[in-house]
Image: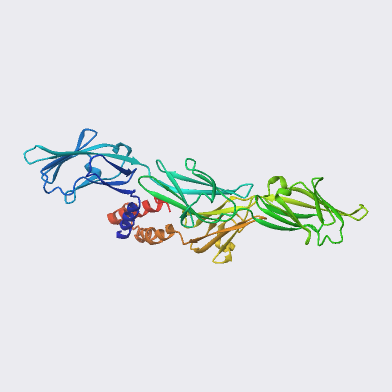
């Protein structure tokens, strides 16, 4: 029973809101409190030498103190005065607590000795931050930062612990909380979101846009893959020293013509490069339009066709990041979902402590699905890997056995055992008498926790 009550106290403690402090000893002070949280307002240094004082909110008296004794408090159920240091605490703040507060002090004979005012503003705190990034066509990276909850959020960015400079981003829009980083920018990017009551940040490791891939196109019918916004190196031939002329066509249109080791025609010269020494053709800043059928035609010195082969190029968006979300289920299993940002045709795989998950560890799903359910008592370092033909990204999470199962075995099962141990000798009536009141209360509290508390 003590363990159950202790657990309830801990859980209630976790539900408390954000706490803020305000120095209201100066006239005209502006104070901020978090919605659902607590604010400590420093009204004065000490109340020992002040015979009496009133606290008004929007001209209505809410607190009256005489000789260090509270004789009137309209919000006594959720507030507390500390006479020793002159602090007034308000809990469970709501929007209605916003307003103008006036403190009036009095002499022992009732004459007014002072008056000052403060303003209290209640704001919803920022609860979480989400970062989403994507590569653009010219190798830039667009990053958006969004927050859950939070009144009047303000955004700031750092890269590797320092403020971003103008030399690192193309554009920034603080109103839309979106930045565009220049090419080749990489490192630990942090977006911080704050208002007057709290601050939350999110970090993401970013790499330079432009994933590089390689394709051997020397065999007829080869299938090649390039990353959207990245670079692909296509091996067209071994050597061009013995080939006087060749053309490269895309969807039946000539895009590259080479005569005696010299490029005489290239429709995408602004973002491609041909290497005569090794027969490679490099295309940069790949777009969806680069997908298609490519035909290499070779000719002899007389201009007669000497060979022809075809390759297919597919452009895919690379996987940029992976998110793992896990939750405990009713019977103690753990459901884990793996989702990826970006990425065409993602394929999933799982490992636990460096080895592939087995069917004996799974209640549902398989090693290639993005949602799995682990059996009870499964714990360790779980890794979800997401890949396609141009990229491979993974995310690791340390998981433990579900708490629900532990609670059940610690509390519910002993309680049920106590009941079953009481044998019915004559009738159900006799059994109900034998159940002591503390056993019933034990079972009720444990069942309440077991069925209502989310994990």
The spot of residue 80 in percent (x, y) is 22, 46
Q: Which residue occupies the foreground of this view, 281 or 445?
A: 281
Q: Is residue 287 left or right of residue 180?
A: right
Q: What residue is drawn where x is 31% and y is 49%? A: 19
Compared to 260, does 108 lie above or below? above
Q: Locate residue 306 relative to residue 239 in the image: left or right.
A: right
Color theme of the render: rainbow
Quarter of the picture containing the N terminus is: bottom left
- Extreme residue toward the top, this view: 59
The residue under the point 10% across, 45% down is 67
Name the quarter where the C terminus is drawn: bottom left
- 415 is higher (above) or lower (below) than 126: below
Give the image location of residue 387, x and y in percent.
Answer: 63, 56
* Residue 107 percent coordinates (x, y): 9, 41
Left or right: 417, with 120 as reference point: right
Q: In terms of depth relative to the viewer, which is nearer, 134 or 2?
A: 134
Residue nearer the viewer, 273 or 108: 273
Q: Position of residue 86 (x, y in %)?
A: 19, 48
Q: Is residue 436 visible?
A: no
Q: Residue at image x 41%, y 58%?
A: 408
In this view, the residue in front, 47 or 172, is 172
Image position of 376 (left or right of 211): left
Kindly tell me whether residue 177 is visible in this rendering.
yes
């Amino acid at each position: 029973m003590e363990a159950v009550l202790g657990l309830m106290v801990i859980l209630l403690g976790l539900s408390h809101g954000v706490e803020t402090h305000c120095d209201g000893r100066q006239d005209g002070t502006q104070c901020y409190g978090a919605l659902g949280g607590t604010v400590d307002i420093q009204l004065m240094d000490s109340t020992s030498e002040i015979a009496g004082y009133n606290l008004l909110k929007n001209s209505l008296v809410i607190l009256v103190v005489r000789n260090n004794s509270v004789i009137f408090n309209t919000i006594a159920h959720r507030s507390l005065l500390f006479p020793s240091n002159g602090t007034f605490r308000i809990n469970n703040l709501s929007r209605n607590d916003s307003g103008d507060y006036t403190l009036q002090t009095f002499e022992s004979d009732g004459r007014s000795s002072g008056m000052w005012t403060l303003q209290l503003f209640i704001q919803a705190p920022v609860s979480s931050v989400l970062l989403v990034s994507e590569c653009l066509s010219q190798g830039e990276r667009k990053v958006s930062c969004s927050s859950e909850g939070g009144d009047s959020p303000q955004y700031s960015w750092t890269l590797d612990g320092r403020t971003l400079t103008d030399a690192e981003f193309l554009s920034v829009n603080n109103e839309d909380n979106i930045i565009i980083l220049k090419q080749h920018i990489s490192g630990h990017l942090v977006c911080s979101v704050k208002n007057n009551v709290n601050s939350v940040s999110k970090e993401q490791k970013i790499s330079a846009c432009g994933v590089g891939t390689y394709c051997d196109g020397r065999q007829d019918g080869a299938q090649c893959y390039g990353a959207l916004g990245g670079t692909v190196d296509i091996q067209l031939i071994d050597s061009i020293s013995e080939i006087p002329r060749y053309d490269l066509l895309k969807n039946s249109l000539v895009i590259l013509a080479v005569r005696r080791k010299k490029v005489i025609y290239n429709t995408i010269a602004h973002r491609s490069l041909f290497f005569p020494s090794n027969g490679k053709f490099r295309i940069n800043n790949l777009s969806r339009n680069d997908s298609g059928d490519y035909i290499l035609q070779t000719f002899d010195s007389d201009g007669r066709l000497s060979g022809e082969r075809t390759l297919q190029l597919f452009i895919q968006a690379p996987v940029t990041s992976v998110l793992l979300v896990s939750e405990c289920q009713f019977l103690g299993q753990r459901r884990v979902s793996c989702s990826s940002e970006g990425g065409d045709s993602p394929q999933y795989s799982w490992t636990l402590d460096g080895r592939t998950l087995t069917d004996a560890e799974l209640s549902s799903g398989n090693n290639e699905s993005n949602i799995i359910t682990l059996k009870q008592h499964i714990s360790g370092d779980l890794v979800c890997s997401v890949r396609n033909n141009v990229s491979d990204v993974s995310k690791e999470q340390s998981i433990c056995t579900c708490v629900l199962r532990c609670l059940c075995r610690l509390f519910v099962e002993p309680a049920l055992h106590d009941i079953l141990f009481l044998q019915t000798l004559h009738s159900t009536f006799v059994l109900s008498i034998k159940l002591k009141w503390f056993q019933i209360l034990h079972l009720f509290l444990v069942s309440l926790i077991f069925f209502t508390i989310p994990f």
